[in-house]
Amino acid sequence: MLIVMDQKATPEQVENVVAAIEARGYTARPIPGGERVAIGILNNEGPVDGSLFLGLRGVKDAIPVTRPYKLANREFKPEDTVVCVGDARIGEGSLTIIAGPCAIESEHQSLTIAKHVKKAGGQLFRGGAFKPRTSPYSFQGLGEEGLKILKKVREETGLPVVTEVMDTENFDIVEAYADIVQIGTRNMQNFSLLKRAGLSSRPILLKRGMAATIDEWLMAAEYILEGGNSQVILCERGVRTFVNHSRNTLDLSAVPVIRKESHLPIIIDPSHAAGKRDQVIPLSRAAVAVEAHGLMVEVHHAPEEALSDGAQSLYPEQFKDLCVQARSVYDVLHGR
Amino acid sequence: MLIVMDQKATPEQVENVVAAIEARGYTARPIPGGERVAIGILNNEGPVDGSLFLGLRGVKDAIPVTRPYKLANREFKPEDTVVCVGDARIGEGSLTIIAGPCAIESEHQSLTIAKHVKKAGGQLFRGGAFKPRTSPYSFQGLGEEGLKILKKVREETGLPVVTEVMDTENFDIVEAYADIVQIGTRNMQNFSLLKRAGLSSRPILLKRGMAATIDEWLMAAEYILEGGNSQVILCERGVRTFVNHSRNTLDLSAVPVIRKESHLPIIIDPSHAAGKRDQVIPLSRAAVAVEAHGLMVEVHHAPEEALSDGAQSLYPEQFKDLCVQARSVYDVLHGR
Amino acid sequence: MLIVMDQKATPEQVENVVAAIEARGYTARPIPGGERVAIGILNNEGPVDGSLFLGLRGVKDAIPVTRPYKLANREFKPEDTVVCVGDARIGEGSLTIIAGPCAIESEHQSLTIAKHVKKAGGQLFRGGAFKPRTSPYSFQGLGEEGLKILKKVREETGLPVVTEVMDTENFDIVEAYADIVQIGTRNMQNFSLLKRAGLSSRPILLKRGMAATIDEWLMAAEYILEGGNSQVILCERGVRTFVNHSRNTLDLSAVPVIRKESHLPIIIDPSHAAGKRDQVIPLSRAAVAVEAHGLMVEVHHAPEEALSDGAQSLYPEQFKDLCVQARSVYDVLHGR
Amino acid sequence: MLIVMDQKATPEQVENVVAAIEARGYTARPIPGGERVAIGILNNEGPVDGSLFLGLRGVKDAIPVTRPYKLANREFKPEDTVVCVGDARIGEGSLTIIAGPCAIESEHQSLTIAKHVKKAGGQLFRGGAFKPRTSPYSFQGLGEEGLKILKKVREETGLPVVTEVMDTENFDIVEAYADIVQIGTRNMQNFSLLKRAGLSSRPILLKRGMAATIDEWLMAAEYILEGGNSQVILCERGVRTFVNHSRNTLDLSAVPVIRKESHLPIIIDPSHAAGKRDQVIPLSRAAVAVEAHGLMVEVHHAPEEALSDGAQSLYPEQFKDLCVQARSVYDVLHGR
């Protein structure tokens, strides 16, 4: 943290800030410049809260210098985290493809889609039993019945399953059925849920919030890591911008940044970013090319009858194409 | 909902879409144009989910025509909702001022600040016992002990208290102590929490999500209203944009829009929008001038020692000025 | 400028960065910390371009510490700049109201509206002769004929006139007719135009770019000031965000920030921010309450027949109300 | 265009809107619904300006149904536009790579870099002679001297050259030296410049504005096409969002959207999107994978000495890697 003083700050004001810094147990190092004084804060363990000093008389700005997260930080743990589920080793040298419908609608629907997913080469099945919906009048998911269908899917196809948890009440039951527990975009900063996830024995797939910076996202992961669960998979799914030709704007530069700053694996959900079927395959190829560790896409055998998000769900035939194209991009980049 | 067909859509594709609309129980009305066909969807009760049709062959776009919310809609309930707590009648012809520290830190701190608030003319006291913090290493609030301090504040000053609930587990206890229960920005689309709030006997102060549209915000309110709780107060606190001179960008145009589209009261939190003390008073005056029903601001008797958000907390003297200025703007606009 | 080194940067890399800083003529001051080294850059006149160092081996970040603008900076010129045109003293203790149609359509139209503006208490008349239009098929303005009508308006009503210049070719002619020359949002970073404006003897009204930060906006002003023209008026007119209930999001916090960081006057254009008539009066009141130095609004005697932006133009009666309300807010804040 | 009436709009108000539509020469088709009336506007040639009707009494909303651009629209010209310059056929089945320094600094610098570009397989050379710089104190480019260096580069290497034009004054001279004339981000809605570009015999590379929607971008292209110049290449270079880990947010979904809605070729500039060297190669691969027609990247043989944008310029060795990786992704997608 660097405290920048006003050009006209008095020596007394500088002294006051130094005292305030030292009162918090840090070391203050004033740096006199030509025009103004700045004060470095040293010897802090963990991040310093800039707002503690921003309001002091004579302070113009408080500029963070180091990242606020620790356990999620590659500087503290240089080697990649690898999450192993079924055959998939997410975060290692391979491409993981997760696919399935937005919502579990019935056993027939789920098994039909899961078979398509497996045949095309998908490694995990996704499907929502508890659905966060903008409208209270929209289909809210089958709940526990949906979880039971997921279990059936795993038994019949051998595919591990990913499903979302929306609250701490249902965490136990979701955890009992799911191989990977998903925390959705709207819950990225539901800190009670993150703390519960930190106690889970399941890997957590943590979607990026719609308006979250990388720092905020990694701090959300930090809650889970700090609780004792080291198995966190990050999932970029588009952020909210002024752009209106896709539902959200897929931020692919997050991939090289996350891979540099953190050791956690990162996958891409192009379906929720696009919101429209015909952008999903191109964005999937791009996600592989930018070196995401995996993809999570929506597939439905009859999208026009889907109870939610039909417009962005691929037909099985399209999903097959996606797998072929994604794997060929992956292979050429990895010299296979 | 208006379905716009591709210019080259075939008559069969148009018929298919008509059939799909009618299969959902709506009336389809094709509108042939010079260049292309559009299809109106009529006789829907409640909102239509455009994505149901967006993926059909030949469909170019699905354009919503009516608002998706119903109970929150002024077209369905023209008269203003007024929430009465203590002396305040929020949503009626008066200006409600809510103030207090970001976090409850101690009985001494809270009582000291509350007395300043009361003396300056604030009508409600705010303070967080459960604090949503970006970092797991930041102060997380005093929890139930904080709620007990709030009770003491009410007893000693007569000010009703507003405090945040972060999860359903603690809803009962928060509800037991609070006069108004706040749902924070990061939980605006925590649908489990919204459903629980719909069962509460307390008024709910619902902050706008950092990246929420008005429609999404009113749909969040709709969850609460639909659950049976008609006492919802909306609170605009800034949205996330590229702008970096304030923590968030206060969207004051939300006030005339909400007042037109909904019957719910709307207040402004300038402290979290600004993130810096010296923008709070000007933005408060602006909030009153744009005809918000109230203000919620952070005050601290010793901001440099505050455990959170010190930089945006007003000194008691500044809060007194704010009250005088805000009320004088209010009075001149209402001919007093 | 503060250069932050990687945690693992070698002493050689630090020395290289120090050498690179000194090669540019600055002073480098390394600040060893617990975890990593930072290097302050001192004795720079004018801003330092961080990208010069960002690419060096071992450098993690380059953090600007001081503002990049100089002539526009209040630290260099503490007293307010006041622009005097006709009766108006923009930037001093008074509220300036500028009004008129989006586009000059005819002498009759302009004179009719100008008389309404004058009668209601507007001090300057605005109207576009050269119109920047998103579509090449939209009305592009009357050009020089429009300028002649503006001259007539000034002669008949005594109101000074504000009109936009779109390119350097037409600068001479616009300057010959206008009392204040406007540079529009889309041209805020048209640097050739800014340089020409720096040579003008007319005050320049510089609108904020749709996605401009305060620093970029003041740097655009700096181009004009540096060219020798000290008469710059800033105009906030909304920025582009995800918000869709207004055409742009009016960023009123820009007013206290500009008033603090710069000595230049700042006015608000609520019409282009809102894009809808019914938000204009509330936002105008808010602009006065936040202490903008003036307002610029669109008025039309027959908005439904306007050739552009009819939806956001006030009726003369509404403009009269706006003036009364805005001035009453102004007066109460200034103790009149 | 669809005009949506208020629920309580009177029959007279509906009639008024119908009359207003027909007064403009369009056909009005009222669509009575269960709750409210909507009115379709038919038989319009070219786009309808919604604001013409938005302000009428009883009108709630005006919703555009068709795209506002015509000449840029694939519905009007289904076959791809291909721009041929030197060996490159931009927009056809091949990948075009354009590279060079941000600014032309000297003959030595430019020739050195151009030889690296050619050797690595780049097909065009880029370099700025006129530089749009945020700060008036930054290096503004060599001007005509820079253009002469570009000519030399073409003569010595055979590479066609791309360079930016900043204003109409210098258009003739830039056109005389350049093979492709670039219009930069900040000038995307400099309509005077676009009109001049419409008269040029050179292909125009039109960068997307920092906050431009696809519709606005294609309308800017429409200005050029409408002026008579059919050779327009679109270039996505990132848009401004809240995201702060890259200079801008690269919007790769623009590629499938542009390819669907327009016949114009689209290339990607990852350097300006990223602003940091280490994101450029991953984003370049992603751009190829999403099927952009080409790449434009910054390369410098000594980035640490570059006069602008050094931090985002690749080293020659990195550029070589980029070409290999980009072409291998391209080839695998096109079955080579």
Image: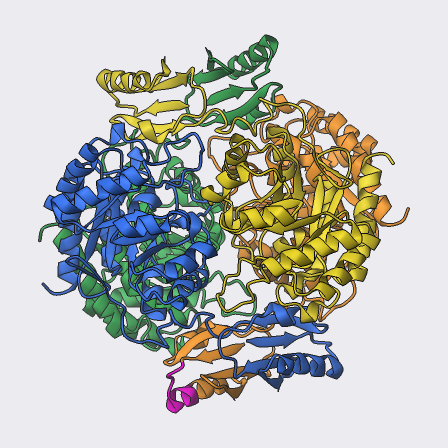
Chain colours: A yellow, B blue, C green, D orange
Say which quarter of the image contains residue C67. Answer: top left
Give the magenta part as a residue range.
D7-16
**Total label count?**
0
Q: In this rendering, would A68 be left or right of C293?
A: right
Provide the major secondary structure of the magenta segment.
helix
Where C220 falls versus C252 (above or below)?
above
Question: Is residue A280 among the parts visible in the rendering?
Answer: no
Q: The C terminus of chain A appears in which quarter of the rendering?
A: top right
In this orientation, which residue lies closer to the viewer: D292 or B20? Answer: B20
Residue at 71% x, 74% y is: B58
x and y, in percent, of residue D252 in the image: 66, 49
Q: In this rendering, would D73 be left or right of A218?
A: right
Where A24 falls versus C97 (above or below)?
above
Question: Is residue D228 among the parts visible in the rendering?
Answer: yes
x and y, in percent, of residue B37 in the image: 65, 81
In reply to whether residue B277 is colored magenta, the answer given is: no
In this orientation, which residue lies closer to the viewer: C167 or A295? Answer: A295
Q: In this rendering, would C31 be left or right of A206?
A: left
x and y, in percent, of residue C295 in the image: 28, 57
Residue at 43% x, 41% y is: C220
Where D265 falls versus A291 (above or below)?
below
Q: The N terminus of chain A appears in which quarter of the rendering?
A: top left
In this orientation, which residue lies closer to the viewer: A243 or A118? Answer: A118
In this orientation, which residue lies closer to the viewer: D243 or B86? Answer: B86
Residue at 41% x, 22% y is: C45
Where A334 falls versus B91 (above or below)?
above
x and y, in percent, of residue A326 in the image: 79, 47
